Image: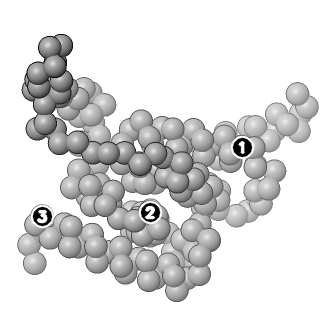
Amino acid sequence: MTARRDNEIERFEALVREHQSAIYRVAYRLCGNQDETEDLIQETLIESFESFSRFRPGTHFDRWVFRIMRNTFIDGVRRRPKVRIESLDAGVPGAGGELQPREIVDLGSSPDATMMAQTLDEPIQRALDALPEEFRLVVVLADIEGLTYEEVSEAARCPIGTVRSRLHRGRAILKEKLKSYVRF
């Protein structure tokens, strides 16, 4: 490996370390669960590293990664097969063909799940999960990460007017979904 390539790897790693918390937060808020978050981050960082030669030093690395993450997330949603949702109350066929109660494993007692429950507010995450992805992205970037409209526009690759419209509509949906948790 050349010294130039080593230097590029070191720069990329340093930038990722510097922004790893924000990268994780945005990915988690987009995905809503640990496994998908880790997959999204891995795919995003691989794509980011492969495209690192196009990153312009002096610009915001995190915004650049968020744009790649957005595209990776949307591509993943499009590739996902449509899933039929079954009631958890419905039984499952047993050995003799008769319906037996469904066994549900409690993952809430694991240290990771406990930490996530303490760190990320579950009702807010459920409300975010219910948002269409284009609204979710702008709400996460603007309201959770604190990016300006211009920065969100750059990361989402849409005009500022669209950012404002999506942010307004996304907030309205969140307000409706969370109204039982807030007293007005």
Checking the image for residue 49, the label placed there is: 1
Q: Name the foreground residue: 157 vs 85.
A: 85
Q: Which residue is mark 2?
A: 133
For image coordinates 17% across by 42% down, the residue present is 87
> On the rendered structure, is 18 left or right of 141?
right
> On the rendered structure, is 93 left or right of 143?
left
> On the rendered structure, is 104 left or right of 155?
left
List x then y, in percent, for residue 83.
Answer: 37, 45
Q: Is residue 102 visible?
A: no
Indicate whether 176 appears above or below 77.
below
Indicate the amino acid at tag 3: Tyr
Q: Earlier in the sequence, mark 1 or mark 3?
A: 1
Colour scheme employed for the rendering of this structure: one colour
The local crowd at label 3, few if under 14, some if 14 to 19, many if 20 or more residues have their Cα within 10 Å, is few
Q: Nearer the viewer, mark 2 or mark 1?
A: 2
- Outermost residue, right side: 2
Indicate the amino acid at tag 1: Phe
For image coordinates 39% across by 53% down, the residue present is 29
Which quarter of the picture shows residue 49?
A: top right
For image coordinates 51% across by 38% down, the residue present is 39
Name the element at disc 3. Answer: helix
Q: Which residue is mark 3?
A: 181
Indicate the amino acid at tag 2: Glu
Q: CA distance from mark 2 to mark 1?
A: 24 Å
Name the element at disc 1. Answer: helix
The local crowd at label 1, few if under 14, some if 14 to 19, many if 20 or more residues have their Cα within 10 Å, is some
- Outermost residue, bottom side: 161
Q: Earlier in the sequence, mark 2 or mark 3?
A: 2
Q: Name the foreground residue: 174 vs 98.
A: 98
Q: Earlier in the sequence, mark 2 or mark 1?
A: 1
